[in-house]
Image (cartoon, coloured by chain):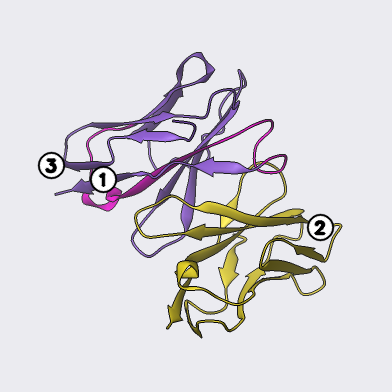
Amino acid sequence: GAGVSQSPSNKVTEKGKDVELRCDPISGHTALYWYRQSLGQGLEFLIYFQGNSAPDKSGLPSDRFSAERTGGSVSTLTIQRTQQEDSAVYLCASSLGGGAGTGELFFGEGSRLTVL
Amino acid sequence: GESVGLHLPTLSVQEGDNSIINCAYSNSASDYFIWYKQESGKGPQFIIDIRSNMDKRQGQRVTVLLNKTVKHLSLQIAATQPGDSAVYFCAETPDYKLSFGAGTTVTVRA
């Protein structure tokens, strides 16, 4: 498809397990974002990738969270030793150019994570 | 820290009426503002944006107004339709990192 693709769409895991969430951005988009959306809340910035530059990780809530972007395309968000408060929808977005201030962000449909 | 917020968490509108959704922001350095629509189970969808050198911008059935003096942003939807039922978020940025408000849930009554 032509949009941002995220997988899995739903993930249920047990507390303490590790999870990986994947994002396939729109082809050619150099900027990639991860946001977290808790139930009934707005979007919380997690991390930003732009081309080959060092990512902005300022939004990651703890060292259990990490993300990488391979080859400037696909990104994986990893949460280690998951906790119940990690339960949320994790949204990925991509943009052509420098990001939000220079172009529209296109969001995927999100990965809903439930930690039991 | 600075934040973006919406005045009302819910808005009920009669089909065919105009809707106005308000947003207050506090980061005076922000120069780009966006409204997003999020339907249940989907990611946010871009509606309209505006830069700080403008105070009004119109799209198809939507208008965004920006008042930098009082740091206020609004989204007007003309002739609201059932398909407009969703959560609406305002977002702001001074650079590349968007900050989102908590959202306003719009319900359209038939």
Name the residue carrying label 2: B52
SS at mark 1 in the image: strand
Q: In which quadrant will I find the C terminus of chain B?
A: bottom left
Q: Amino acid at mark 1?
A: Leu
Chain that bears disc 1:
A
Q: How many marks?
A: 3
Q: Nearer the viewer, residue B46 or A17?
A: B46
The tint chain A carries is purple
Residue A10 pos. (x, y %): 24, 43
Q: Is residue A59 above or below residue B7?
A: above
Which residue in the structure is indicated by mark 3? A14
Magenta span has A96? yes
Dividing the picture into quarters, in which one does residue A102 lie?
top right
Decide if residue A90 is in sight here.
yes
The span from disc 3 to disc 1 (Cα, nearest Å) is 11 Å
Looking at the rendering, the stretch of residues picked out in magenta corresponds to A78-103
Q: Chain of mark 2?
A: B
Q: State the CA–CA distance, disc 2 to disc 1.
A: 37 Å
Colour chosen for chain B: yellow
Instruction: Name the residue: 71% across, 43% down.
Output: A101
How packed mark 2 is, by other alpha carbons closer than 10 Å (few <14, some 14-19, many 20 or more), is some
